Amino acid sequence: MAIEVTKQIYKPSMTVGQVYAAVYGAAVLPMPVGNVLELSLEHSEDVQTQDDMTRLGGGTYAEVRRVKEVKVKMKLADLNVVNLARSVLGNVAAIGAGTVVDEPFVATPGGLLALEHINATDVVVKKGPDALTATVVNMAGNYVPQPEGVVLQAEPAGITGGDLLWVSYSYGAYAAIEALTTKAVELHLLFGGLNEADSGNPRVVDIFRTSQGVTKQLGLVNKGFNTLDVEGTVLMDPTKVGAGLSRYYRARMS
């Protein structure tokens, strides 16, 4: 019975669970964001005090406490397209598979021909003053295809500095994220938690409306797993009305 839950004293907490997110106000269901290593709500207060001037020794005569703000902090372990785009304020473009014919470059031995598309296959490099008369250059001893482009050998057998090169290739579908091109997103977050310290009982927290800021850092080379450390501010949700109802967040547990 509900009354029995409210009387429980023993309630240690060690929670795991899934975090779901949806753009605030959108008519879509919240979707899982993946593995979240840390999720927390942090409250800060504005405290106004009045000195006790009625007698010697001082002290506090009156105090008013108001919540100044509530911060959401998350450590995201899954750097999927949606999480990454939200964390760098980016727009996402879905690039379909295709082919490129005669993308032009000027050769520098040992340099990278940074192709317009990633993870090229069926790479063909030609050399010549124009694409129509250029002749095919053998791969062996001249260049190595890489996901980021084509790397010229330091001492290529058939290419010299300043040669005009023409690269043709195929590529698969991929996503392109253009960072810092949009405003911070507002989200509805829901945490479906399970309390490992209390027989796996559920703890569900709805954060009705929160902003998500840019990640503190975007790790590119390191020895461990990458994470996205993001935080935002819990905002008032004007759609929540009624006596005793929060306009910020709600926690439910059994």
Image (cartoon, rainbow, N blue to C red):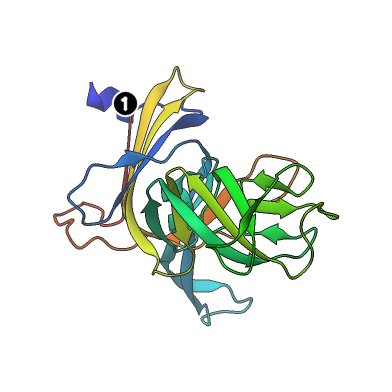
Q: Residue 24's x, y, as percent?
A: 26, 56
Q: Which residue reaches farthest front?
A: 133
The answer to whether residue 219 of the structure is visible from this angle is no
Q: Residue 150's x, y, as percent?
A: 66, 52
In this rendering, the answer to whether 244 lies above or below 16 is: below
In this rendering, the answer to whether 181 lies above or below 240 is: below
Q: Is residue 114 left or right of residue 6?
A: right
Q: Which residue reaches farthest bottom?
A: 53
Quadrant hosting residue 86:
bottom left
Image point (44%, 49%), residue name: 99
Q: Which residue reaches farthest left?
A: 242
Image point (38%, 56%), residue name: 93
Q: How many marks are shown on the rendered structure?
A: 1
Image point (33%, 26%), residue name: 254
In this rendering, the answer to whether 195 lies above or below 28 is: above
Name the residue tied to disc 1: 5
Q: Amino acid at mark 1?
A: Val
Quadrant hosting residue 253:
top left
Q: Give whichever of 65, 234 is nearer the camera.
A: 234
Q: Which residue reaches farthest right?
A: 155
The answer to whether residue 28 of the structure is visible from this angle is yes
Q: Work out which quarter of the rendered image holds the N terminus and state it.
A: top left
Image point (70%, 58%), residue name: 112
Helix, strand or loop at mark 1: helix
Q: Residue 141's x, y, as percent?
A: 79, 45
Q: Give whichever of 52, 198 is nearer the camera.
A: 198
Q: Estimate how packed mark 1 is, as few (under 14), some (14 to 19) or many (20 or more) residues with alpha carbons within 10 Å.
A: few
Q: Residue 89's x, y, as percent?
A: 45, 64
Q: Is residue 24 left or right of residue 85?
A: left
